[in-house]
Amino acid sequence: MRIPELLAPVGSPDKLLPALDYGADAVYLSSQQFGLRASAGNFDIDDLRKAAEIVKAGNKNIYLTLNAFCRNKSFPALREFLNSISDIPIDAFIISDPGVFLTSREVCPHIPVHISTQANTINMESVRFWENQGVKRVILARELSAQEVAEIAKSSSCEIEIFVHGALCLAYAGKCYLSAYLESRESNAGQCSQLCRRTYQLLETQGADRVLSVEMDDENAYFLNTRDLCLIEKLPQIAEMGITSIKIEGRMKSAYYVAAVTRVYRDALNTLKQEGIISEKKLRGYTDELHKVSNRGFTTGYFGLDIPQNMIKIEGKYIQQYVFMGIIENPVNGTFRLDPRNKIRCGDRIEIIGPNRANDRIATVTKIIRDNTEQTDANPNQISEITVDIPVYHGEIMRINEEDYNK
Amino acid sequence: MKQIATHPSGLRIVTYEMPYMNSVSVGIWIGAGGRYESLKQNGMSHFIEHLLFKGTEKRDGKEISQAIEGLGGILNAFTGEEFTCYYSKVLSEYFEATFDVLWDMVTNNYFKADHIDKEKSVVKEEISMYLDLPAQYVHDLLSNIMWPDQPLGRILIGTEGSIDAMTNDTIVDYKNVFYRMNNIVVAVAGRLSHQEIYDTISRYVESGASQGKIPVAEAVVEKQDKPVSLIMNKDTEQTHFALGLRSFHRQHEDRYILKILNTILGENMSSRLFQTIREEHGLAYSIHSSIERFMDTGSLVISAGVEEKNLIKTVELVCKELRNLTQELVSDDELDRARKYAIGQLSLGLEKTMNIMLWSGENLLCTNNVPDVNEILDELRRVNKEDILRISRALFVDNNLNLSVIGPVKNKKTVEKALTVG
C-alpha cells in the first residue's frame, strides 16, 4: 500500500494557504497564460515566486499548469514566459501539448514534466511513450476503469496521478468542441463556457420539428450536466494500486471549497495510513462532509464503472447544505475582521471549521460592528468586525447550515 | 423536560421540570473564569466569587447564608476556567426566596473596603493551603506546563501579588464587564415548571436589553515538540505526580470516545491503571484519570501519589498502559463494561436535580446549546474498539506528554527519561 500525495487546486493566491493548511501535500496552479483556466484569478510571475517560496518552506510540492494547446503564434510568448520563471523552484510543469513539452525541455530542462490529463493518456503504451520522452509523471485520463488504472500503474515506471474529486467533463475530457463551436470559446485554450451546465429542451427533428417536453416538477432539465467525481470510497483500492498522486479538481472553486474538500481527503488518507482501512462509519462521515460543500451530486464515474444514467444529474445544478460565510483573520478573543461572502446576522449559529474535521464547532455571532457602529447584520463585501462567543483561530472558516441561513 | 428561553434582558434560562422531586437546584452561571483574566487580573473571577458572599446593600454575609440555610437549603459557589457558578438546592416552595438571595448577590456592586481586605487574607490563606495540598497543587503546576504563558495555564486562584494588587475599582471594572445579563445563564432543575420559574425570575430581572460585547476567552496556543516535565522539590511524605495530555474541546466529534477511553484507562477500580498500579504492583493508594473540556481544547490527566523511590517505575508503568492502548484493540468485554459504566454513571447522575442543573447550565453558558441526553447515550453506545485505538494513537504521543511532580525528587533526569510512550 502506498499513501498517495494529495494534490489540491489553487486558482488564485488567496487559495494557497487554505489548500496547504487544510492538508494538501502539493498544489497546482496556473500562470496568467497557458493554463487552461482563463478566468480563474491565476498567478502573475511575482505571485508565482511568492507561492513557490511558501510551498517549499512547508516542504510541499508546487506544480505549474501549462496545459493549453497552443497555436504557432503563442510560442514566442511561451519561451519568454519560461525564461522568466526558470529560476523559480517549481517541482513540475503540467503539460499536454507536445510542442509545449519540447519548448519546456529546451528552456527549463531542470524542471520535470507531468503529462496533463488533457493529453488523454488511456493506455500503458502511451505511458511508455511518455516515459521514453523523459516525463516524470503521467496524469491519466478520467475515462478509465479501476482495472485499467491498476494495470497501467503496475506496468509503468513513471509516476501515475489520477483525479479523485471534482467536476467531470461531459465529453472525453479535453476533446469537447461545444464551447468553441457555439460560442467561439475554445475549451482547449482555457475558455470553456460550460455549456453542459445549462438547461436544454429536447427537440425532435426527424419528421416534424417538435419540442418533446420533459416533466421535471417545475425544474428544467440539465441533460448534459454530469455529476461530480468522488472517489473517497475508492481510496483503499487506489492506495493498493501504488498511485503516486491523487488530484482534486477545481481551480475555479472558492477557497472554502478547496479547504473543505482537501481536509476530508487528508483525513481519509491519514486514517488509511494509521489504520490500514477506512471504516464504514468514517466513510459515512467523509461523504456527509463532502455533501455539505457545493456539488452536483456524486458519481464514481468511469473508475467505478458507474452506469451512464448515474453520471448525469438531470434535475438541477448545485447542491449545497452549507453557506460559506468567510475566513477568520487574526482573531483576538473571539473578535475578528470578516469579509462576508454571504449575509451574516447577529445571533446566527455558525459552524467553525478548521483543518481537523473532528474539531468543528458551533459558535454564536454576538456582535457585528461596521463604521464604528453596532449592526444587526453584514451583507457580502461589507467588511465588518465580528465577535463570536468562543475562541477561534486564524484561517478557520465560517459557514452556516442552509436552513438556518434561509430562516 | 428541558426548555430554554432568552429573557428580554439577554439572560438565558434553562429549566428541567422533574415534577416527582421535592427539590429545585438553581445555579446562576457567569461567563467569567480564569482563562478570561489578563496577567494582572489573575485570580479576579475567583476573588469576586468570594466577595459576593460578604454582603450586599440589603444583607450582610451572615444574613445571606442564614437566608438559605435557614430554609433547609444549601448555598455555595465555584469558579472554573470558563465560568463562575453560584448555586443552591432547596425545597421547591423556597425557590423564589432563594433566587432573591442569589440574584441579590450576583447583581451587587457594593463592596466594603474592609470586606475586600479581609477576603484578600482569606484567599491568600487559600493559596497557602493549596501549597500544602500537593495532590491538588500538582494539577496547577501541570496546567502551567500544558498551556505555558497564557491564561488557561495560570493558577486559577491567583498569586499573592495579583491578589494584593486588587482594588475596589479593578474589581468593579472586571465585574461590570462580565456580570452582564447577556453573559449570564440561570439553570434550574426540579419540581417547578418552566413557566413558574420564568415568571419568578422575571420579577427580579430588569427587562432592558443588556448592552456591550460578551467577553470571549483568548484562544489557546499549543506548541510542544517533546515530553515536558516540571518538578517541584519538596519534602513531602508522598511524591505526587500528574501526567497530562491535551485532548478534546467541548464540541469535539470524538469527545464521547475519549469518555470511554478514559473509563477504560483510569476512571474506576476496574480500570487498567487502578488494576496495574494499585492491585498488581501495590505502588499507590489510588490512581485516577480524568478529562476536562474547554471551549477550544481539553485535557486528560492521570494522577497519583507514590513513594519517591517508586516514581520512575510508576511513570513507566503509566506510559506503558498508554502505549498498550495505541498498539492493541481493547477487548469486547472491556469495551462493553466501559460503555455501560459511562452510560450508567451519566444516567444515575441525572437522577439528581443538582447534577442536571450543573450539566445544563455549563453547556448553555459555554456552547449556547444543551444537548439531548438520549443523543449522548446513543453516542456512547456507538463507540467501538477501532475508535478507541484511533484516538489513543492521536493523543498518546510523546509531544503531548506533560508531567508535573511534587515531592523529594532526587534525580530529575531519570524522571524525564521515563516519560515516553515511544
Image: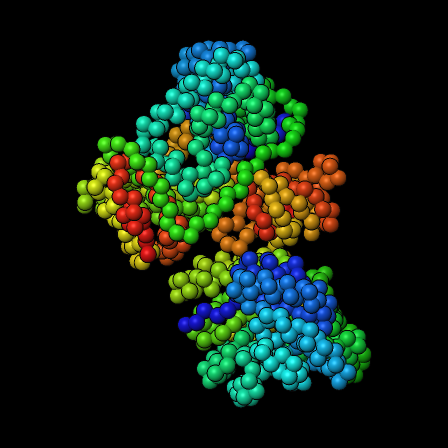
Place of residue A383 in the rendered image (x, y in percent of width and height, measured from the top left): 72, 46
Q: Is residue B10 left or right of residue B88?
A: right
The answer to whether residue A400 is seen in the rendering is no
Residue located at (56% from left, 15% from top): B110
For residue A352, above or below residue A347 = below
Residue in the foreground of this view, choosing between B408 and A320:
B408
- Residue shown at the point (36%, 25%) measured from the top left: B128
Foreground residue among B22 and B173: B173
Q: Position of residue A346 (x, y in %)?
A: 66, 39
Is residue B24 depicted above or below B301 in this figure?
Answer: above
**Residue A6 image position (x, y, % from top left):** 52, 67
Considering depth in this image, is B127 or B13 the residue closer to the camera? B127
One can see residue B184 in this view: yes
Q: Residue at position x 47%, y 73% from top?
A: A238
In the rendered image, which quarter contains the C terminus of chain A? top right
Q: Please, is residue A322 above or below residue A155 in the view?
A: above
In the image: residue B159, left or right of residue B318: right
Residue A225: image x %, image y %? 67, 70
Identity of the residue drawn at 73% across and 50% down: A381
